[in-house]
Image: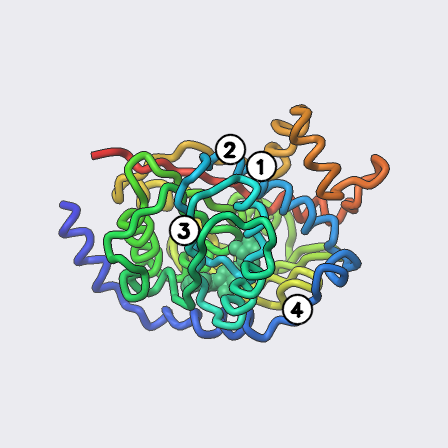
Amino acid sequence: ATNKKRSLADDVDNSNDNNAQQVAEHYNTRRELGVEGRLHTKITGLRLFNNWVKSILIGMHTFRGCKVLDLGCGKGGDLRKWSYAHIGEYVGMDIAQVSVTQAQKRYSELHNARFPARFYAQDCYGEPLTKTLQPPDYRADVISAQFCLHYAFETERKARQMMRNVSEHLADNGTFLCTIPSANWLMKKLRATEDLAFGNSVYRVEFAQREPVSVYGFAYAFTLDEAVEDCTEYLVHMPSFVALAEEHGLELMYCTGFHDLYSQNIGDRQNLELFQRMRVVDDSRPHISPDEWEAVGIYLAVAFRKIAK
Ligand code: SAM
């Protein structure tokens, strides 16, 4: 039955499957603000908060010496977090060549990186990773996809290729860790307005229609001040994502909104100290504005485990 499903899915019309180059171009042409610049934007608090969340997730799901494959690694903004987690080896991949070059540079400038790293410019959703990833039977203990997996939900073919890539390159009992916009949260907001658009002073979401016609390819334009502008993204229909993962031998372990993740983790002394060290709060004043806090609510942290055969 699985084989039948696969070949059917592979035959799905791919005429809508052309956003990858646009996404690559979008990220390739983004202005690099630098560390100082990033501290003085309207979304500085949001960035710091998201970095804290990713640090917590990385701490929760990695172990000393583990092999990490980062799909959609961007400019390598998480390299320091992986370094603090004492990982053993890192492979970063992203469709945007400019970002990959910046990630490579960031790695070479990281003083305390005690792990070897490799970087590749590669479409991680539209193509098999074996095109570039060596050896072809490479397996990571953790596969991470932070704030980027929603691009795979443009078509069923892409989502399936993404999941095949994850399943083929994840070790038994390994973790697939991702952060994605919550489809429920976005749909709730859409249904609460008579318009097709909503947002506040830091973000804006605009749909072209009110209801999805299919599980894949339900697009919206996303703008986040100083980060992305009118970028086409796709809703991740969670039940379909979980079913697809199960079909590829992965089971859902964890799915939590960022607001809940904050409440669940801030009580821990180490997490609170990290919160303070990462400057999400300064002199116990939060950097984060109410509008940024609303935007935080867009995101979900999701983790799957690959079931050992
Ligand atoms: N993961 C990084 C982080 O958390 O800072 C970057 C997140 S950025 C919002 C989204 C990234 O996804 C961009 O770097 C973009 O180039 C990458 N991306 C989008 N589609 C991709 C694809 N098909 N294959 C690989 N990377 C992709």
Q: Secondary structure at mark 1?
A: helix
CB under 8 Å between discs 2 and 3:
no
Quadrant for the N terminus, please: top left
Dot 4: element:
loop
Given residues 122 and 298, the one toward you in this image is 122
Residue occupied by mark 1: 56
Disc 1 marks a residue whose amino acid type is: Ile
Give 212 or 281, whichever is nearer the viewer: 281
- Disc 4 and disc 3 in contact, CB within 8 angstroms: no
Q: CA distance from mark 2 to mark 3?
A: 16 Å
Give the residue type that dot 2 points to.
Met
- Helix, strand or loop at label 2? It is helix
**Residue 150 x %, y %:** 47, 55
- Residue 203 percent location from the top left of the image: 68, 57
How far is the residue under mark 2 from the one under mark 4?
Answer: 30 Å
Say whether disc 2 or disc 3 marks the residue closer to the N-terminus. Answer: 2
Quarter assignment of residue 268: top right
Name the quarter where the C terminus is drawn: top left
Asked if one can make out residue 290 in the rendered structure from this viewpoint, the answer is yes
Amino acid type, callout 3: Leu
> What residue is pinned by disc 2?
60
Residue drawn at 45 percent across, 63 percent down: 94
Real-space Cα separation, disc 1 to disc 4, in angstroms: 26 Å
How far across and how far down the image is residue 10, in percent?
A: 22, 61
Mark 2 CB near ligand 1 (8 Å cut): no
Q: Earlier in the sequence, mark 3 or mark 1?
A: 1
Q: Which mark is residue 32?
A: 4
Q: Which residue carries the number 3 mark? A: 69
Q: Are marks 1 and 2 in contact (CB under 8 Å)?
A: yes
